[in-house]
Amino acid sequence: MKITSFQVRCVIVPMPEPLRTASGTVGVSPLVLLTINTDAGVQGHSILFSYGLAAQKPLAELMRNLESVAVGQPLAPADLSRRLHGHFRMLGTEGLVGMALAGIDMAVWDAFARAHELPLSTMLGSSPRPVQAYAGVSYEGALGSGQSAEKWARKGFKAVKAKIGYPTVAEDLAVVRAMRSAMGPDAAIMVDYNQSLGTSDAARRLRALEGEGLAWIEEPIVAHDHAGLVQLAAAITTPLQAGENWLGALGFRHAFDAGVRGLAMPDAMRCGGVTGWQQIAALGQLYGVALSNHFWPEVSAHLLCATPTAHWLEYMDWWNPILKEPLDVRDGMAYTSERPGSGVEFNEAAVQRYLV
Ligand SMILES: [Mg+2]
């Protein structure tokens, strides 16, 4: 079976609710949708998220330019990944290049699993199983965060993660306590600073959160300050979480080599797609690091099934409108589709509606 063509489309999907963070509000998802066609009629799909509008069209253009490198190649994800990475040996595979390669990798793995009529998790040597999932609460103050947590609890979630990093540590604490009282003593509560603290401020703030029973504190400081993360981890008992901003398996190796342990969360688009994730899953097993995902809930649910140290699935519903079958989450557990592929298939009517 050989790859015959790419279809690359840009859509702008409105968020179900605007995402508020300490650094601004996001109302839409600019996405690049890739469909890979093969000579047997099997297709593969993937979604890339450019965060802002400025990078959406350049990313789509980059993927279109890579069509000629993939066309005519066998539908063999590992071989194609090596070929595509080899193509960029001089430029490197970070930034937009890495995102484009990850998008192709995810679509090729999706087609590969469909060609074998197996779910991706089975294709990776595992099998579909339920994965514990948490939902997100944005930067909405104590009252708003408590109400959002309650909304997720009503949908069956037993875990939520809030954006914090308010002007004062008292406000951070108020948010955590509002969510705790909404969710109950047994809920898992996580918080995410999105790299907003300086190292000395972080030590003070994280110590103030010590008594709250948090499941993790995410990215308190810049994600690439490995020494800072090691130092902070030694000063507290709450686990630290990081990884959504580490690029490729190499980014994880650098962090682990620097002594960063705790918890890690690869982002399928930044970590190199399915192929990159598999390398990180092996590192997670060797270093004894529990792995959760960042975004990409459909594909990540399959990947977590095949990850020896799988921890939590981050659920998000932002891209549900363009999916034929969004991830099934019930009673706080995510159930991967047992249909062939990675779980990504487009709702064509919705894609046409949001097409740019
Ligand atoms: Mg985060």
Image: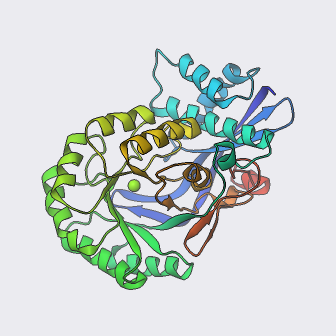
The colour scheme used to paint the residues is rainbow
Quadrant assignment, res 317: bottom right
- Residue visible at 41% across and 77% down in the picture: 187
Q: Depth check: 115 or 205 in front?
A: 115
Above or below: residue 83 compared with residue 293 = above
Above or below: residue 341 compared with residue 28 = above
Figure quarter occupied by ligand 1: bottom left
Looking at this view, name the residue that lies furthest to the top.
Answer: 90
Q: Depth check: 27 or 343 in front?
A: 343
Q: Where is residue 75 shown, x and y percent of the image?
A: 74, 29
Q: Is residue 191 left or right of residue 171?
A: right
- Residue visible at 57% across and 56% down in the picture: 297
Quadrant assignment, res 130: bottom right
Q: Is residue 236 visible?
A: yes
**Quadrant containing the N terminus in the rendered view:** top right
Q: Where is residue 33 shown, x and y percent of the image?
A: 66, 43
Q: Is residue 276 left or right of residue 227?
A: right
Q: Tally the numbered discs.
A: 0
- Residue visible at 55% across and 78% down in the picture: 156
- Residue visible at 37% across and 66% down in the picture: 190
Q: Is residue 174 left or right of residue 155?
A: left
Q: Where is residue 259 shown, x and y percent of the image?
A: 25, 41
Q: Depth check: 166 or 326 in front?
A: 326
Looking at this view, name the residue that lies furthest to the right.
Answer: 40
Above or below: residue 103 compared with residue 350 = above
Q: Where is residue 266 shown, x and y percent of the image?
A: 46, 46
